[in-house]
Image: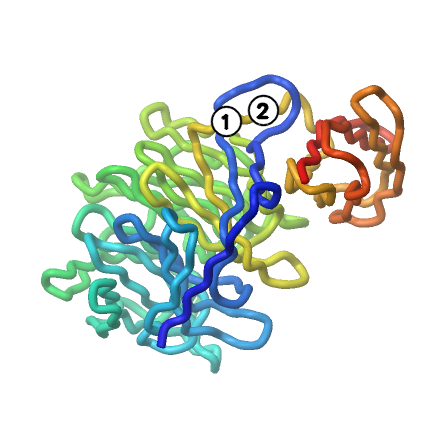
Amino acid sequence: MKTIIKTQLIPSAIIFCFALSMATVNAQGTWTQKANFGGTARHDAVGFSIGTKGYIGTGEDMDSLRSDFWEYDPSMDMWTQKADFGGGKRTSAVGFSIGNKGYIGTGMDMMMNNKKDFWEYDPSMNMWTQKANFGSTARSMAVGFSIGTKGYIGTGMDSTGNKRDFWEYDPSMDMWSQKPDFGGTARMCAVGFSIGANGYIGTGEDNDSLRSDFWQYNLSMNMWMQKANYCCVARGDAKGFSIGNFGYIGTGGCMDSLCSDFCEYDPSTNMWMKKGYFCGGKRANAVGFSIGNFGYIGAGSDTIAPYQDFWKYDPAGVGVNELSNPLNIFVFPNPSAGKFILDSEISKGEVFIYTISGEKILSQRIKNEKSEIDLSKQPDGIYFLNIKTEKESFTQKLIINK
């Protein structure tokens, strides 16, 4: 029996979030919240797309590791449960798609044992088939992506430590072939994706520290070339995907906190551009993939609990350009029905809310990095949030739309 989950959002509940805030209109991309992931809230799951559908499965929720597997239909904004992953419950695996098939392998099981088994999913049959084991050592927290008709897995952590070996999978031969080692340091919890005929791996955690370096695997030359470092601070457990000729990386665990920043990479110029913040807030170990011209990020966890939310990114959407945000403050959802979450890197300060005519209607102290602002009793309209600390001040427009 399969389970179908559909969330019917009424207009007032649809949440749009501009990637950046403040006053100047600019095509910076927009985030739209979609139906929650159909399974339990979780982190360290696997995600990929096949054709016009997205897929998320495995991972770890509040109770245990999971093996359930779900299909997302963006045209219906609907999740449908599919056959459980054939390799059983696990976390920190890798996945990618080649043509009309999906693949999941490696990861860690319930006994904290690293895995090297590798499985193929056929959506037309809703069936898993075990294929040749990953060509190297059992591992978890690796990266995987596909280029054309081949799949690739590299880096990660096995029983001896972090790895930098890199392997190609040929589904027509059901065979693994070793390729040149990843060009950076051995690491786990990196990000991998492909753009055209090239693959990319960056960020992650090596034996010494978090990393921000970024590398291109040139398929035709069979070699690695270092590219411009990721545009924001070093991190691990971030999430990335590609849309057309651009790559994207965001969220993750930074040195002292979780992150929500989001950046775009242009391989033609070898330049990163900050595109603001992921509108679901700070998190690590999320799932990301792209379908057509849109990207998706969902699930993951903060320092307390896993998430179930799921967001769509439109890189062509017109957002609002952030002129100054010295406190790295993020407010979501915005617009909302009146309740906003304030997420920042400050734990002390004061919040003031003003009407568009300048009347102060609320003031409250900031007591931790994430807090709620409740304006649900106020009428629909535009308001202004002002945050003050001992050294800085920040103002942002809020929209209430019930």
Q: Residues within 10 Å of mark 1 (few under 14, many from 20)?
A: many
Residue 305 place in picture, x, y as percent:
64, 63
Marker disc for residue 243:
none
Q: Is residue 393 left or right of residue 149?
A: right
Q: Quadrant of residue 383?
A: top right
Residue type marked 1: Gln
> Is 376 in front, or is 300?
376
Q: Please report the residue visible at 48 percent of the width from the left and 66 percent of the height from the top.
A: 39
Q: Quadrant of residue 355?
A: top right
* Element type where label 1 sits in the image: loop
8 with respect to 267 (left or right): right
SS under mark 2: strand
**Amino acid of disc 2:** Val
Q: Which residue is tagged 1?
A: 28
Do callouts 1 and 2 mark residues in contact (Cβ within 8 Å)?
Answer: yes
Residue placed under numbered mark 2 in the picture: 320
The residue positioned 36% from the left and 23% from the top of the image is 269
Q: Quadrant of the C terminus?
A: top right
Q: CA distance from mark 1 to mark 2?
A: 7 Å
Q: Is residue 336 visible?
A: yes
Disc with the residue nearer the chain's start (1 vs 2)? 1
Looking at the rendered image, the quarter that the N terminus falls into is: bottom left
